[in-house]
Amino acid sequence: MVNNQKFKKRVGLLNLTQDQLERLHQATLDILTRVGVKVCDPAVVDLLKNAGASVEEDLVKIPDWMVKHALQTAPGRIEIADRFGSAAMVLEKENIYYGTGSDMPYTIDVDTGERRLTVKQDTINAAIVNDALEHLDFVMAMARASDVPEERVDRHHFEAMTLNSTKPIIFDANDREGFLDIVQMASLAAGGRGRLAEKPYIIHYCQPSSPLFHTENALEKLVASAEEQIPVIYAPAVMCGATGPVTTVGSLLLANAEILSGLVVHQLVSEGAPFIYGGGTPPLNMISTVCSYGDPQLTLGSISLVQLSHYYNLPSFTLAGCSDAQAFDQQAAMEAGMNLLYTGLSGGNLIHDLGYMGAGMTGSLEYLILCNEGVGMLKFLLQGLELNPQTMALDVIEKVGPGGQFLTEQHTMDNFRSQMNFTSLFNRNNYENWQAAGAKSCGEYANALLKEILQWHEVPALERGVEKRIKEIASGNHRFRDELA
C-alpha cells in the first residue's frame, strides 16, 4: 500500500555551512562594536544612544545585545496582498517570488529596438506587461521617467504601477514626503488606511550608503516605514573592490553590518514592524569599471545573503534575471538563466531585477518576457512530485501492458496539462513546422508577444474618483494627506 505523499525537496544551494554562518555573524558583530556606523540623523543617534549604543558625534557603535534583541522582535513571516486585498505572497523561508527592478535610465524601444531614454509610458508598459505575465509575482517601476519633474518622479512611478497592475508593488521614494504621499495613494487604492495596514500590497525599498553609512534621507524613510507599519527592504549594494573589499566575504560582512544596524534602528522605532533582509554585493569590473550584474561573483554574494537571512529567520530580498549584455542576445539569456536558477535554488523570497540589461542601465520588456518563461520552468521543477494513484498510474500501466501505447488513453487526456510545462515563447516544434511558421527567433517571438500584451491586456480599473485622486497626488495637486487615517 502506497501512501499519498508529496515530495517538495529543494535541490538546495547551501554554499555556507552553519559554522561559516556563525563566523560571519560574529565578525559582523565585531564590526558594529569596534568600527561602528555613521548615522546622519540626530534623532536616530539619540534613539540609539538612549537604547544603549556607544555614541561619539555621529559615529555609533552597537553592542551585540541590541542586535540580538532586534532579531528577536522582527517577524520571520510577512504576508503581502495584491491590490484587491487577496493573499499574494507569504515571505518566509524558501517561498520564492520574482519581479522587476526599478529606475533604469534607458529602455529598448518596443517598436524600433533602439536604446533610448525612458519616459513615464515605459513604466506604464512595464506594469501592464508584468501584470499579464503569469509567472511574475510583484512589480517595480523598471524605468526612471525622464519626462516628469525629478522631485515627483517617485509618485509618478507609483501611480503608473498601481493603476496598471494589481500585483504587489515594491516602491522607492525620493524622501520621507514622497514616502507618505505614496502611502496615501496606496491607501486610496486599497480602500482606506486601515485596509492597507491589515493587508498591505506595498513594500518600501530604501538603501544605506556603503560603506557603513546611514544617510539622513535613508533613515527618515526607514523610520517612516516602521511608524507606518509598511514592510521595508533596507538593502545595501556594496560594490566589491569599490565601496567594499574586493573579496566577496569582506563585502558580505559590510552588507550584513549595514542591514543589521538598520534593523536595530527599525525595531527601536516599532518592535515587530515588518523588515525584509537583503541586498547585493556586485563586483566592480577592474577592466571596464562597470558594476557588473552578470558576473557570478554577484550571484555568489546574493545567495550568501539569502542564507544569512535564513540564519536570522528574516524574509529576504535578492536579485536575478539581469545581465551585463547590451542587447537581448545569447549572453543576456545565459546570464539570466544562471542567476534565476541559483537564486531560486537558494530560496530567496523577493527576487527582483528581471529584464535588466546593460549592467543595470537598460530595461528590455522582451528580456522580461524571456525571464518570465525561465521562472515558469524553475517553478515547475521546484513544485516537486506528488505520489498518489492518479500520478503513479498503476492501473493504466497494467491496462496497456508490455508493447502498448499511452497516447490514446483517457488518463493521458486527463493529466497531461498538469504534468507538462507549456510555453508561449520557446520553440517546442520540429524543424519543418518551425520553418513553416516563419522560422522566427526567440527574440522575434518575444517582441510579437510583447506587442500583443500591450494591445490586448486589460488591468481592472480603480473607481474613477480614486484614480483621479491618485493622479492628483502624483502631480502634486492635492491638499490633504491625513484624510484616510
Image (spheres, rainbow, N blue to C red):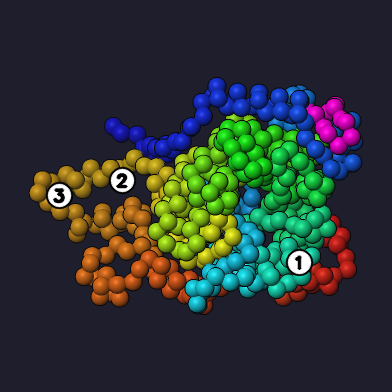
Q: Residue at x 66, y 23 (%)?
A: 26
Q: Which residue is mark 2?
A: 391
107 is higher (above) or lower (below) than 19: below
Magenta part of the chain:
52-62
Residue 299: x and y in percent read: 51, 43
91 relative position to 370: left or right = right
Residue indicated by mark 3: 400
The residue drawn where x is 60% and y is 23% is 23
Query: Residue furthest toward the left?
Result: 403
Which residue is the site of mark 1? 150
In the image, residue 113 lies at what x, y percent?
49, 73
Kindly check if marks 3 and 1 are in contact, taking CB atoms under 8 A apart as contact: no
Question: Looking at the image, do the residues carrying marks 3 and 2 touch, with CB atoms under 8 Å apart?
Answer: no
Whether label 1 touches label 2, CB < 8 Å: no
**Could you tell me the amino acid type at mark 2?**
Thr
Neighbours of disc 3 within 10 Å: few (<14), some (14-19), many (20+) = few
Which of pointers 1 and 2 indicates the residue nearer the eye? Answer: 1
Q: What amino acid is found at the position of numbered circle 3 in the picture?
A: Val
92 lies above or below 375: above
Quadrant of the image occupied by residue 389: top left
Along the line of sight, the residue nearer the viewer: 385 or 389: 385
* Camera-side residue of 2 and 482: 482
Q: Secondary structure at mark 1?
A: helix
Q: Residues within 10 Å of mark 1 (few under 14, many from 20)?
A: few
**Kind of residue at disc 1:** Glu
